[in-house]
Amino acid sequence: MTTRPFKSAAVSPPDSSAALVIVVDDDDGMREGLREILQSVGIETLGFGSTAELLGEALPDRPGCLVLDVRLPGLSGLDLQTKLNALGNQLPIIFMTGYGDVPMSVRAMKAGAVDFLTKPFRDQEMLDAVAIAIEKDRARRLEVSANSEVTALAATLTPREKQVMAAVATGLLNKQIAHELGLSEITVKIHRGNVMRKMKATSIADLIRKVDSLQPASVG
């Protein structure tokens, strides 16, 4: 699971919770305005006046995104993005600023920002950006969940089954695997069948896809 620098109050299954947009801006009016815009389409928000407030708060683990002002007291929005990236946190970020310039926006986008909006922006611009960010986060969470499931399935394999699985994933035939592992071809077929069943693989292509998603230590 991705490292989160925020305190976590609760953990929800991926993609099962309503989206949450976290707004960080030292302008009370901007935070309230964004809350009203997002609430109008049924999206809940949490507002903070600084990155320090955000990092000190217990946050629910829900699909969503960060909407960050670039200029903030203390740690800036861009510096927070750098910190999150260093920690491996992939929560999508939308930047907004009244003082944007091209180098600033390029830096933010290269570091993975979903969008960079210059104030004043149209309500629809923000709604569109948020919709893209939330969808991106939902997709990421589903991928993480799927990979976790595959890792759990791989943990049920015996050391020999992991060896056979790794060999199958490289395209070796049963006869070649038998020679490489010093087994009979019949034994390889048995192990191969066990691997397909335990990994819930519907085909060799499906098995290879699952193996590709595993960390090397999980394959054996």
Image (cartoon, rainbow, N blue to C red):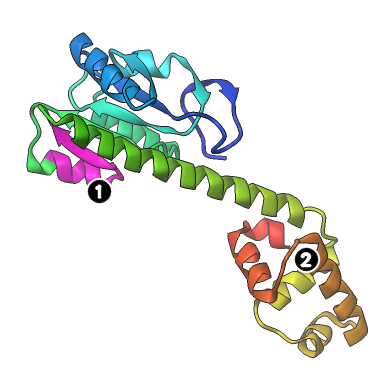
Badge number at residue 7: none
On-image quarter of the N terminus: top right
Q: Which mark is residue 162?
A: 2
Residue at 22 percent of width and 16 percent of height: 33
In the rendered image of this protein, does residue 38 appear above or below residue 205? above
Report the amino acid beneath label 2: Lys
Residue 111 is one of the magenta-drawn residues: yes
Image point 10% across, 33% down: which residue?
100
Residue 5, percent from left and from top: 46, 27
The secondary element bearing badge 2 is classed as helix
> In this rendering, would 17 be left or right of 31?
right
**Residue 178 pos. (x, y %):** 83, 84
Badge 1: residue crowd in 10 Å (few <14, some 14–19, many ≥20): few
Secondary element under disc 1, as helix, strand or loop, is helix
- Would you say the residues marked 1 and 2 are in contact, meaning their CB atoms lie under 8 Å apart? no
Q: Residues within 10 Å of mark 2 (few under 14, many from 20)?
A: many
Task: Work out which quarter of the rendered image holds the C terminus and state it.
Answer: bottom right
In the image, taking residue 8 as reference, residue 119 lies left or right, namely left
Whichever of callouts 1 and 2 sits on the residue coming sooner in the sequence is: 1
The magenta-colored residue range is 104-118
Q: Position of residue 56 (x, y in %)?
A: 43, 14
Disc ID at residue 110: 1
Note whether 206 is above or below 63 in the view shown: below
Tally the marks: 2
Amino acid type, residue under disc 1 in the picture: Lys
Location of residue 17 by image quarter: top right
The residue that appears at 55% across and 46% down in the rendered structure is: 142
Residue 139 locus on image (x, y percent): 47, 47
Residue 184 seen: no
Of 115 and 107, which appears nearest the observer? 115
Quadrant in which residue 170 is drawn: bottom right
> For the residues marked 1 and 2, what is the alpha-carbon distance in whole angstroms?
39 Å
